Amino acid sequence: MRILLKYIVLLFLIISNSQVQAYPQASKWFTQGPGNKVTLYVDFFMSSTCPHCHKADDFFSSIESKAPWLKIKRHVINTDIKALKYFDSQLQDLGSTSFAVPAFMFCDTHWVGFLDAQTSGKTLIKAMGYCYQQILKEGRLSAETIAILKSQAGANQYEMVTAEPKSPLYLIPLAGMFDAFSPCALFGFLGFLGFLWLVPNQKRSQYTVGFSFIIPFAMVRLIQLISLEQFYRLSELMRWPGAVVGGLLILLLIRCARQLIAVKTIPEPRYIMILSMFTAGMIALYQQSCDFNVGLITQQWLDNQPAHEQTSLLYYGLYFICYMIPLSIILLIVSWLSRKEKYAHHALKFTIIGAVLLAGIALLLLINPTWLSSIYLSYGLLLLACVIGYGLKSIRRRREQK
């Protein structure tokens, strides 16, 4: 009965909160009027001598009459000192330092650059429309909406522009394989090596553990490309499950260490395989939030291509396959090297390095999984793992000599 009352109270609070949110709100980014009428405000910063600014100005002039919910205020920063000061204050508010124009600020995000109506224009209007619809639906500008728009704004600064139009069949494989080795994917690469080095000299186990990591890792990436909104919702839901995975991973590493010391073997590979699947998914969820996000750049480029929905799904499938190729090649190389005699002499060292890498990832999952997007932490963890691996191996060798 007590549990039922808790659920009733919780439901009442949720309903009450939703009713409060439904009342008109004021914001510098939007206003809500009678009848849930939402007006979205956009600050457009430009220069009178910038040709791309004039392209953007012409584009927005053509759509303002078609989108009455959109109010665009133009600021010419090279002729109006007040506009320049306002630009500076807005940049400070949004934590940005780029004075490049054309620049667009809306929904607490900063967008830079404009190529043409078919590419940049389409991306900007889609983002503004998404923000508008979310405010209509939620009655507010949520943190999730802002996070999604910031990811898209970051990708928008690296538009895929070539001198001649290229086929998606040419660009997608390159982007997919490069994405697997981008700074956004370094923790995934370290985690992958960590699990492989826990099962040295076991070809079958390495393939099992390797592909149990690669497939969910690529699947989560695919979810982000297909639906960024669902990806962010999933990342919020997985905070506590991620901590559980981190805890289980630490327990597995403790068990590995005990067995390695006692009988010089590791636990059954199936435990490692199961945890590699869940760890791969968690790493993929939280590491893909750096600025140079190749996947989101590719997504925006694909959205601007004249393709049917079925064709786009095929392109995403191709991206998924190409994203798995680099890690699959590494798996083949590690498996081949592990059967060499020289590798056997260093197997313990690699196992220790792998265990330290996984321990670092487990701690980040427990403390704050969003730190998995930090390139500096990934470099630091790699350096620490190498130092510990080489150090412990040297200490053991000296003891054996004595």
Image (cartoon, rainbow, N blue to C red):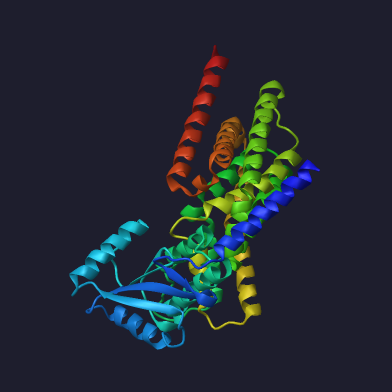
The residue that appears at 64% across and 36% down in the rendered structure is: 247
In this view, which residue lies farthest toward the top? 402
Is residue 257 visible in this depiction of the protein?
yes
Quadrant position of residue 176: bottom right
Q: Position of residue 163 (x, y in %)?
A: 39, 79
Q: Is residue 32 above or below residue 288?
A: below
Work out whether 277 lies above or below 144: above
The residue depicted at 66 percent of the width and 41 percent of the height is 245
For this orientation, the residue located farthest to the right is: 1
Q: Position of residue 73 (x, y in %)?
A: 33, 76
Q: Nearer the viewer, residue 188 or 39?
A: 39
Figure quadrant of the N terminus: top right
Residue 344, given in percent of the width and then of the height, sits at 62, 33
Position of 206 with respect to 236 (left or right) is right
Residue found at x 24% / y 70%: 83
In the foreground, 32 or 89 = 32
Above or below, comparing residue 213 to residue 69 in the picture: above
Q: Give x and y (percent) for residue 139.
A: 54, 66
In this orientation, does residue 338 appear?
no
Where on the picture, by quarter, is residue 258?
Answer: top right
Q: Residue at x 63, y 64 (%)?
A: 321
In the foreground, 99 or 86:
86
Q: Quadrant of the C terminus?
A: top right
Count of marks, rendered view: 0
Q: Is residue 262 left or right of residue 48?
A: right
Side of 100 relative to 117 (left or right):
left
